[in-house]
């Protein structure tokens, strides 16, 4: 039996307000907003999804700011400021910043 | 999954006499794909550009129980349907639109340590109507962390063969080769393809639903749990991406890399120099004097030496880069450099090629293959030769010593200024080229930072060997040809000795025949005679004639025809400039002070001093910026598969060098120097 640890667990974030990824603090967890990737260019959106950063997935911020580093499904991805500022997320409740 | 019995495979194999079946390795970056390829093919692999492209791929042959299997390692991609050049290339390869023949089977790499994402990738690849085998890589790593996959259950789930492997330990590699060959020979019927599609989510499914499907499969076929990255990794990452400690680590690692290729490579380079020098002396002693001996010694042996001498730097650079890449640091370094280099239209990955070019542009240009985007890569190739390489050093030392004799602080500043001028010119040129010829949206940095791993020395040695062979095969042959042509231009036509030289010969012979001749005096006379002979040959050769023809072009910079000859001959390699100046100045002393004395008193035909401050300064600026390196142009031609880019690079760099040298000279003349 396997325990899924990272994705599709955005229940705790349902009521939070949307903020850009660049505003999260280090160690903070968040769920990508279902509409947030639409502001990105098509190519960037597709690449992010293929790298595992897709709508409703949960991520953890490893390096805050712009550029930032996030962890999704055990994969760390570095995002430049221009992309990270257009990715909107809902911070998970009870997941304080480190 | 059911496989055919061996006898039927042998029967099919018998018909396939023209070529072995071909498999394409398809997978995401950092999934152990190339390590698995190296395990499968070992030494029976070569690196070559995919026909009609500048993207390279490794092709090798794996031995299986039932015969040979050709394997092609395609570039790592995040998705087959992405509109990025690497994904398009993989699609074209799988469809047979590029390359001589389409692969018979696709081996889809699934990283056991990132299984959910790998399943999503596989679901797209499996929708192609071709035999597929799933190779689960890094299985040993995942098992150590308490996670394992049931291959039989996964094969049932996906409707294709699944083999658990580890490129590092060799686990499952033979089984994978056998299974892949069987799948290639078996082919795929419409019925089995439709069955496979039945197992997969619909093609238009949303990413969220695809993730749900992948997690359902994972629950069914896997056991255990992979925790998120360790706290140690977290701390290391925090330190390496911190504005202060990250920058310090970056500078330290890059300094060590640079120091290694700058100083460590010097030992094997000196050995090679000695070996070829000895070989040349031996051939000179054995063969009768004449054009054939000159061709062998100065043309061929000199040309081979001029090519092979770059090998230590290239091999060392790629060995170290492989270790850094394998360890996971290289991606962090690219991340750290990206913000700065993006301002000039270059990606973070361009930092390593630009730094390496400070040792030699050749390994620097070869290492641009780290850059995934073709436009980014081309822009980096175009500006890399602006970085001050080691071949420029002797020229810098000589001219700065001329300009700032007895003023070490100013000389030091001028030295730093030369390096800074090259780097700034390179970055500004990159800015310009990305906004004109290579215009278009820059690919934003979305960079996967792979987990930290202990780097494999074995893989690094393979990479080093592969790159060395590739350099010798691709660029080496062209560099050798250029060396031979340049030697020929400098050596022919043979010039008749001048009355002055004949007189020197007679005098030397007379002194040598005396019973009480002083050997030191005889040696000094012979040395002076040889220099005079070289000088006459240099100025009377085709290169010398070209120097006379080209003199008007360089006259505004203060160069006379002798300096123009030195500039033209240094086109083969910049360091040749100093030896040509020694010949022209009639000094054979390796003592820098002796050469400087000669140069400071050297005069033009009209009696004026040759090396005035404005002329020496303009020459220094010219050498800092000019593309005075034919081997680099030859390599750029090979890397870009076109003469357009090296010609453009030559015209731009030479034009900029000429313009800046002229401005500096005029400014100094106006300032009363």
Image (cartoon, rainbow, N blue to C red):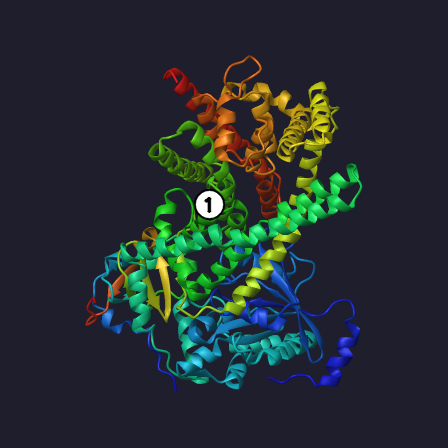
Against B175, is B303 above or below? above
Residue at point 52% right, 26% down? B598
Residue at the far top: name it. Answer: B606
Q: Quadrant of the C terminus of chain B?
A: top left
Chain letter for mark 1, please.
Answer: B
Placement of B250 over or under B9, stated as above or below:
above
Residue A34 showing in the rendered view: no
Question: Could you say where residue B181 lies in the image, as x and y percent from the top left?
Answer: 67, 76
Question: In front: A96, or B631?
Answer: B631
For this rendering, which residue is in front, B454 or B344? B454
Instruction: Give the percent coordinates (x, y) of residue B269.
Output: 56, 51
Quarter of the image for residue B296 reads top right
Of residues B468 and B533, the one nearer the viewer is B533
Residue B273, visible in the rendered structure = yes
Label 1 belongs to which residue?
B358
**Residue B254 sits above or below residue B113 on the image:** above
Counting labels gives: 1
Which of these two is toward me, B209 or B104? B104
Q: Determine whether, in the image, residue B67 is placed left or right of residue B71.
A: right
Query: At numbered mark 1, what does the secondary structure look like: helix, strand or loop?
Result: loop
């Amino acid at each position: 039996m396997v325990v899924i640890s990272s994705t599709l667990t955005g229940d705790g974030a349902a009521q939070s307000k949307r903020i850009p990824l660049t505003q999260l603090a280090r160690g903070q967890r968040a769920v990508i907003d279902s509409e947030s990737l639409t502001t990105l260019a098509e190519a960037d959106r597709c690449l992010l999804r293929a790298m595992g950063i897709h709508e409703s997935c949960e991520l953890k911020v490893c390096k805050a700011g712009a550029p930032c580093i996030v962890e999704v499904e055990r994969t760390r991805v570095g995002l430049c400021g221009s992309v990270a500022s257009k990715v909107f997320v809902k911070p998970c409740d009870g997941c304080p910043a480190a | 999954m059911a496989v055919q019995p061996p006898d039927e495979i042998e029967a099919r194999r018998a018909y396939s006499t023209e070529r072995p079946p071909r498999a394409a390795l398809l997978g995401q970056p950092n999934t152990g794909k190339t390590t698995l390829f190296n395990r499968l093919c070992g030494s029976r692999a070569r690196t070559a550009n995919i026909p009609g492209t500048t993207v390279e791929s490794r092709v090798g042959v794996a031995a299986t129980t039932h015969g040979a299997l050709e394997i092609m390692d395609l570039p790592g991609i995040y998705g087959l349907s992405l509109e990025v050049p690497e994904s398009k290339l993989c699609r074209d390869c799988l469809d047979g639109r590029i390359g001589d023949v389409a692969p018979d089977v696709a081996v889809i790499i699934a990283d056991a340590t990132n299984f959910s994402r790998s399943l999503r990738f596989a679901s797209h690849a499996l929708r192609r109507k071709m035999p597929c085998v799933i190779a689960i890589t890094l299985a040993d790593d995942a098992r150590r962390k308490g996670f394992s996959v049931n291959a039989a259950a996964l094969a049932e789930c996906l409707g294709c063969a699944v083999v658990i492997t580890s490129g590092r330990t060799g686990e499952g590699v033979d089984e994978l080769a056998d299974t892949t060959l069987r799948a290639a020979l078996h082919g795929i019927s419409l019925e089995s393809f439709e069955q496979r599609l039945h197992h997969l989510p619909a093609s238009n499914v949303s990413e969220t639903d695809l993730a749900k499907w992948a997690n359902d499969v994972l629950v069914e076929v896997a056991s255990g749990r992979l925790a998120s990255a360790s706290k140690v990794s977290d701390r290391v990452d925090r330190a390496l991406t911190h504005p202060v400690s990250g920058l310090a680590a970056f500078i330290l690692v890059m300094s060590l890399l640079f120091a290694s290729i700058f100083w460590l490579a010097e030992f094997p380079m000196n050995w090679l120099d000695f070996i070829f020098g000895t070989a040349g002396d031996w051939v000179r002693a054995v063969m009768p004097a004449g054009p054939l001996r000159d061709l062998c010694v100065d043309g061929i042996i000199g040309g081979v030496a001029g090519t092979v001498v770059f090998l230590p730097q290239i091999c060392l650079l790629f060995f170290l880069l492989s270790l850094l890449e394998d360890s996971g640091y290289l991606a962090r370094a690219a991340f750290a450099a990206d913000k700065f280099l993006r301002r000039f239209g270059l990606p973070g990955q361009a930092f390593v090629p630009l730094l390496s070019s400070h040792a030699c542009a050749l390994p620097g240009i070869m290492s641009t293959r780290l850059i995934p985007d073709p436009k980014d890569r081309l822009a980096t190739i175009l500006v890399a030769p602006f970085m001050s390489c080691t071949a420029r050093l002797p020229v810098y030392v000589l001219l700065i010593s001329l300009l700032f004799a007895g003023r070490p602080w100013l000389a030091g500043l001028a030295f730093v200024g030369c390096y800074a001028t090259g780097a700034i010119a390179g970055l500004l040129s990159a800015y310009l080229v990305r906004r004109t010829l290579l215009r278009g949206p820059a690919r934003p940095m979305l960079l996967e930072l792979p987990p930290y791993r202990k780097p494999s020395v074995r893989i690094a040695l393979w990479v080093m060997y592969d790159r060395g062979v590739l350099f010798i095969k691709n660029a080496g042959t062209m560099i050798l040809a250029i060396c031979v042509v340049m030697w020929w231009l400098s050596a022919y036509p043979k010039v008749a000795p001048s009355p002055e030289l004949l007189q020197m010969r007679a005098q030397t012979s007379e002194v040598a025949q005396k019973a009480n001749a002083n050997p030191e005096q005889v040696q000094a006379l012979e040395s002076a005679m040889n220099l005079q002979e070289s000088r006459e040959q240099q100025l009377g050769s085709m290169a010398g004639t070209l120097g006379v023809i080209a003199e008007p072009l360089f006259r505004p910079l203060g160069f006379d025809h002798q300096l123009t000859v030195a500039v033209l001959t240094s086109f083969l390699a910049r360091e040749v400039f100093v030896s040509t100046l020694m010949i022209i100045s009639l000094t054979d002393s390796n003592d820098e002070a002796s050469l400087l004395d000669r140069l400071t008193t050297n005069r033009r035909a009209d009696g004026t001093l040759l090396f005035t401050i404005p002329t020496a300064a303009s020459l220094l600026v010219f050498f800092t910026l000019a593309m005075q390196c034919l081997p680099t142009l030859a390599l750029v031609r090979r890397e870009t598969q076109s003469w357009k880019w090296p010609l453009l690079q030559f015209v731009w760099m030479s034009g900029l060098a000429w313009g800046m040298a002229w401005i500096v000279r005029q400014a100094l003349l106006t300032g009363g120097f």
